[in-house]
Image: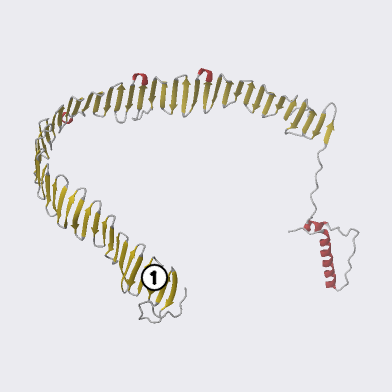
């Protein structure tokens, strides 16, 4: 509730007294006070006051000017003797007390613009700029004297002598660096790194890598739960070794020699000549062995397959195939005898015979003179000068050297004399080409005929449009509403044309000419058009009485 002013309170009190007196039937008399603004204590308690709170007095300041300026105000003191001395002192609780009494305080001073001194419960500092820095913050102490830096606290310490060494340790880790000795170490709970010249050691959790670059490198992931991996690399000796516990995988490389073991498989390579692989999981009937002395010898054996390869000789047996290869005779049986191949050669390929009993397919050849191929749907023979191929239900192709080809299909035919003549039909389509002067292509929608470069004709069967160009004569005929429209141009001399309800002729495209569309006429003389409308719809000469016209 907003407080009322004393004048308003006095007016309200007077009106209330007058109303009471009138109610008792006697005239009201309002006594005047010597202080019109005074109100009784009871009214003041109910109404409150708009008066402002009293402003406290400023603290008393004591100043002196000799032998230095001094200003003292309650808990702070300032002394100045510029530029030689500056001092500021602040008394800390409990206060008040005298500045020369014992008790906590924050005191700092600057002497000669070079020496800074501070004493307080939390911070102490002595600085002789720029040579000496000494500081205390709570329990942490720091001392810096030129390149020497010493810092100590309950949680960490740092000792530096730049640029010779830098060392420190904290609850999270530590470090040591000696740049001139090419030495550096750092560590924390997650890992560590140490470098001493070419030697290095890195730790990341349980994983450790170390080495002497570029001569020796080693690593171990430290996994003792069945997934351990280790490696060793010696580049000058071309040596590498790694082990992987999960896959039982071991690899060793020493120059051109390689040993590897992966599960039941073991390998030895003397690259690039000798390759040996053995697979043995304890079952003698499932063992596999591979030997290769490149390029002289290869032998492999397994539960179901055996292979022997020598220069010019191959013998291979599997449950489904038997293959024998020599420079003079080759025989192959596949799919348990369903397919058979006999080849006299291939050094001198004279005789070839292949039979597929499942597909009833037989092929034979007396190279390079004659070959024949027969299946239930295909019959073909080939010679050096001619070939004939028949596909049942589709057609045949005959080729006669050097470039004649005849194709007879169920839906058409084609005769080609490569690369000059191509003629034929296929359903509604036909073509005739005598390169490079004549082309004719016809189908259900269009036809194009070109006798290069004198004659060009294009016809659209769907739209009923034909366009032809012979030297400098162009003719077009097209189907329009009500009939056919034609036009002929003899470039650049004359042109004429007719339509169901129109006609025109021109000499030199406007030197003289006439155009009619319905009853509208246009006559040109010296390229000037004269237009009028024919009063007689029957007239077609364009020379009827002109009547009114404009140009």
Q: Is residue 360 left or right of residue 249?
A: left
Dividing the image into 4 quarters, which one contains the N terminus?
bottom right
Q: Secondary structure at mark 1?
A: strand
Choose between 366 and 342: the one closer to the eye.
366
Q: Residue 488: which quarter of the image?
A: bottom left
> Up-down: is 441 above or below 334?
below
Q: Is residue 435 above or below residue 266?
A: below
Q: Is residue 477 left or right of residue 48?
A: left
Q: Which residue appears farthest toward the top when viewing the image?
A: 181
Residue 519 lies, in percent from the top left, at: 39, 77
Residue where numbered disc 1 is placed = 513
Query: Crowding at label 1, few (<14), some or many (≥20) Cα neighbours within 10 Å?
Result: many
Left or right position of 85 against 185? right
Q: Quadrant of residue 423?
A: bottom left
- Image position, residue 187 (x, y; %): 49, 25
Colour mode?
Answer: secondary structure
Q: Residue at x 42, y 71 (%)?
A: 524
How many tags in the picture?
1
Residue at the image point whose x is 23% and y is 23% from the top:
273
- Residue at left 21%, top 55%? 432
Of residues 216 and 502, the one drawn nearer to the viewer in this rendering: 502
The residue under the point 77% across, 33% down is 76
Most distant residue in the right direction: 34
Residue 355 visible, this orientation: no
Does residue 75 appear anywhere in the picture? Answer: yes
């Amino acid at each position: 509730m907003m407080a009322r002013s004393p004048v308003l309170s006095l007016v309200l009190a007077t009106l209330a007294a007058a109303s009471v007196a009138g109610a008792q039937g006697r005239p009201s008399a309002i006594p005047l006070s010597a202080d019109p603004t005074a109100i009784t204590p009871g009214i003041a308690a109910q109404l409150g006051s708009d008066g402002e709170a009293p402003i406290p007095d400023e603290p008393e300041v004591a100043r002196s000017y000799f032998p230095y300026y001094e200003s003292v105000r309650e808990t702070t003191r300032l002394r100045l003797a510029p530029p030689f001395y500056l001092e500021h002192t602040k008394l800390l609780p409990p206060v008040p007390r005298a500045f020369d009494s014992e008790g906590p305080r924050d005191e700092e001073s600057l002497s000669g613009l070079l020496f800074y001194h501070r004493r307080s419960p939390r911070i102490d500092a002595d600085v002789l700029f720029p040579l000496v820095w000494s500081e205390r913050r709570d329990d942490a102490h720091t001392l810096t004297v030129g390149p020497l830096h010493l810092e100590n606290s309950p949680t960490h310490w740092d000792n530096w002598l730049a640029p010779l060494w830098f060392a420190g340790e904290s609850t999270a880790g530590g470090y040591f660096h000696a740049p001139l000795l090419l030495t550096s170490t750092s560590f924390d709970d997650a890992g560590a790194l140490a470098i001493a010249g070419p030697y290095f050691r890195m730790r990341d959790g349980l994983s450790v890598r170390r080495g002497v670059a570029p001569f020796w490198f080693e690593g171990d992931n430290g996994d003792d739960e069945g997934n351990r991996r280790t490696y060793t690399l010696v580049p000058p000796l071309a040596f590498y070794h790694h082990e992987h516990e999960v896959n039982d995988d071991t690899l060793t490389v020493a120059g051109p020699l390689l040993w590897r073991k992966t599960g039941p498989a073991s390998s030895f390579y003397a690259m690039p000549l000798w390759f040996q692989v053995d697979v043995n999981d304890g079952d003698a009937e499932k063992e596999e062995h591979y030997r290769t002395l490149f390029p002289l010898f290869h032998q492999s054996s397994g539960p179901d397959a055996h292979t022997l390869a020598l220069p010019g000789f191959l013998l291979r047996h599997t449950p489904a195939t038997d293959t024998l290869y020599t420079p003079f005779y080759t025989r192959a049986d596949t799919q348990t005898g369903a397919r058979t191949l006999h080849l006299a050669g291939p050094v001198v390929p004279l005789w070839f015979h292949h039979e597929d009993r499942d597909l009833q397919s037989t092929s034979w050849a007396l190279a390079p003179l004659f070959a024949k191929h027969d299946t239930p749907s295909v019959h073909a023979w080939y010679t050096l000068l001619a070939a004939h191929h028949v596909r049942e239900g589709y057609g045949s192709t005959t080729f006669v050297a050097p470039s004649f080809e005849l194709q007879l299909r169920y839906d058409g035919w084609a005769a080609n004399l490569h690369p000059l003549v191509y003629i034929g039909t296929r359903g509604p389509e036909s073509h005739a080409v005598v390169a490079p002067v004549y082309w004719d292509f016809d189908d259900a929608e269009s036809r194009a005929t070109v006798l290069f470069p004198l004659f060009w004709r294009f016809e659209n069967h769907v739209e009923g449009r034909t366009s032809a160009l012979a030297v400098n004569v162009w003719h077009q005929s097209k189907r329009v509403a009500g009939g056919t429209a034609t036009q002929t141009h003899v470039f650049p001399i004359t042109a004429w044309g007719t339509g169901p309800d129109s006609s025109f002729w021109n000499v030199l495209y406007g030197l003289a000419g006439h155009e009619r569309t319905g009853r509208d006429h246009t006559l040109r003389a010296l390229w000037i058009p004269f237009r009028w409308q024919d009063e007689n719809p029957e007239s077609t000469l364009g020379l009827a009485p002109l009547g009114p016209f404009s140009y």
